[in-house]
Structures are given as structure tokens and as C-alpha cells.
């Protein structure tokens, strides 16, 4: 999205911070093959990656989860060394297999931080040094419509300055109108007030 916006608008938005991550996907076919319950695998994964909450500490209005923690290891080490128990077979025997047999690891990239506002989470794109704001807005909207995956919203100094300018124009118009009526009341003639605004016509 960022590259496409830069290509179409000719203005590169400020870079968004991304971070590398690893996605774990459970192979359901192997769950059936090795007779492992999905809930048990989910529980073991949470414990292995230190996300197993055992209790909640209540203190006034605050809630602090207490998790089971372990030593620092790489993802591959955790998946290789952590074993999970299978369901009993026809003879009642159980086995232990490493998590790596049931989980697929794929590299991925995601946002380093999440930005949210009144309307929910969004991805900010900041444009600086814009000469034609209306043209940029039109091109950004068209890009989002073509990609069909994004909804757009706009904010910033361009809109606040434009709104402030409109308000100043309205205030100036009202001020001139009030001054005209004051002069008209003073001279008791509408044309005389126009003459005061226009200066001496002789």
C-alpha cells in the first residue's frame, strides 16, 4: 500500500515501522494422525511460549494476570524440546511427540505498533510538503478503491487550516456587514453607507 501510494501520488508517505515475526499454524491432519486433541495442543503452546495464565491478582481496580514463565529459548528450540502427550490408542498406550511435528512455522511481517482512534484501529500514512491537497486526496481515495482492501479517512493541518480560513472569511464578512449597518444607521441612508465604504466619488 505504501509503495503504491508513493507511485501514484508522487509523494512518499513517511515510513511505517514493521517488525519480523513468526506465524504458527496447526496442522489438523497431523493432529488426527498422532491422536492429539486440539485443545491440549493449544494449552501446551500457550505454556511453552509463556502465555499460560494460572491466576489473576486483584488489587483495587487493577487486574494483574500471573503467567507461567520459563527460560529464554528460540522458537525452534521450544518446538523441538517441548513434548505433548497423545491420546491413548486401542491398547491404551500413550506417546510423547515434539510440537514441531504438529506445527508449521512461517516467517511474516507485521506492524510494530498499532494506532487507534475513535473509529478503531488504522494504519497512518503521513504526507509532508503537499502542494495540491485536493489532488492528493483524490489519488489516495482512488488507490484505496482500486485495491479494495482499505477504507480511507483524512485528518491533519491541511484540513484544520482550511477550516480556519473558512471561519476567518465568515467572520470578516459578518464584520463588514455589521460595519455597513452601523454606518447606514448613522447616516440614515443605505447609499451613504456605500459611499463611505467606497470613498469620495467626487
Image (spheres, rainbow, N blue to C red):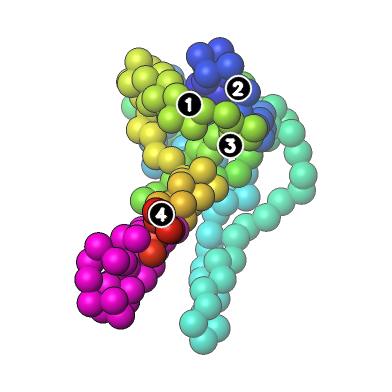
Residue of label 4:
202
Q: Upstream in the sequence, badge 3 or badge 4?
A: 3
Residue for point 55% across, 66% down = 65
Q: Which mark is residue 126?
A: 3
Given contact means CB atoms under 8 Å apart, are the residues at marks 3 and 4 in contact?
no
| Secondary structure that dominates the magenta span | helix
Given contact means CB atoms under 8 Å apart, are the residues at marks 2 and 1 in contact?
yes
| Residue 166, x across and y down, in percent | 40, 52
Q: Which residues are magenta?
A: 167-195
Residue for point 37% across, 20% down = 142
Of helix, strand and loop, which one carries label 1?
helix
119 with respect to 60 (left or right): left
Q: CA distance from mark 2 to mark 1?
A: 9 Å
Q: Which mark is residue 11?
A: 2
Q: CA distance from mark 1 to mark 3?
A: 12 Å
- Tag 1: Cα neighbours inside 10 Å, few (<14), some, or many (≥20)? some
Q: Is residue 192 placed above or below 105 in the rendered structure?
A: below
Quadrant of the image occupied by residue 145: top left
| Residue 183, x across and y down, in percent | 33, 74
Front tag of 3 and 2 = 2
Q: Upstream in the sequence, badge 1 or badge 3?
A: 3
Amino acid at each position: 500500500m505504501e509503495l503504491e501510494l508513493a507511485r501514484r501520488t508522487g509523494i512518499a508517505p513517511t515510513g511505517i515501522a514493521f517488525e519480523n515475526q513468526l506465524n504458527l499454524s496447526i496442522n489438523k491432519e497431523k493432529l488426527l494422525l498422532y491422536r492429539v486433541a486440539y485443545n491440549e495442543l493449544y494449552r501446551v503452546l500457550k505454556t511453552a511460549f509463556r502465555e499460560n495464565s494460572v491466576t489473576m491478582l486483584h488489587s483495587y481496580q487493577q487486574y494483574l494476570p500471573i503467567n507461567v514463565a520459563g527460560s529464554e529459548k528460540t522458537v525452534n528450540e521450544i518446538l523441538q524440546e517441548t513434548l505433548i502427550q497423545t491420546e491413548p490408542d486401542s491398547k491404551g498406550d500413550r506417546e510423547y511427540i515434539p510440537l514441531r511435528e504438529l506445527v508449521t512455522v512461517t516467517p511474516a511481517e507485521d506492524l510494530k505498533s498499532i494506532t487507534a482512534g475513535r473509529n478503531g484501529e488504522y494504519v497512518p500514512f503521513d504526507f509532508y510538503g503537499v502542494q495540491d491537497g485536493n489532488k492528493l486526496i483524490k489519488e489516495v481515495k482512488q488507490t484505496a478503491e482500486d485495491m479494495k482492501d482499505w477504507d480511507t479517512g483524512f485528518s491533519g493541518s491541511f484540513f484544520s487550516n482550511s477550516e480556519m480560513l473558512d471561519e476567518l472569511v465568515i467572520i470578516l464578512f459578518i464584520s463588514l456587514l455589521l460595519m455597513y449597518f452601523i454606518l447606514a444607521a448613522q447616516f440614515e441612508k443605505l447609499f451613504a453607507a456605500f459611499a463611505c465604504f467606497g470613498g469620495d466619488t467626487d
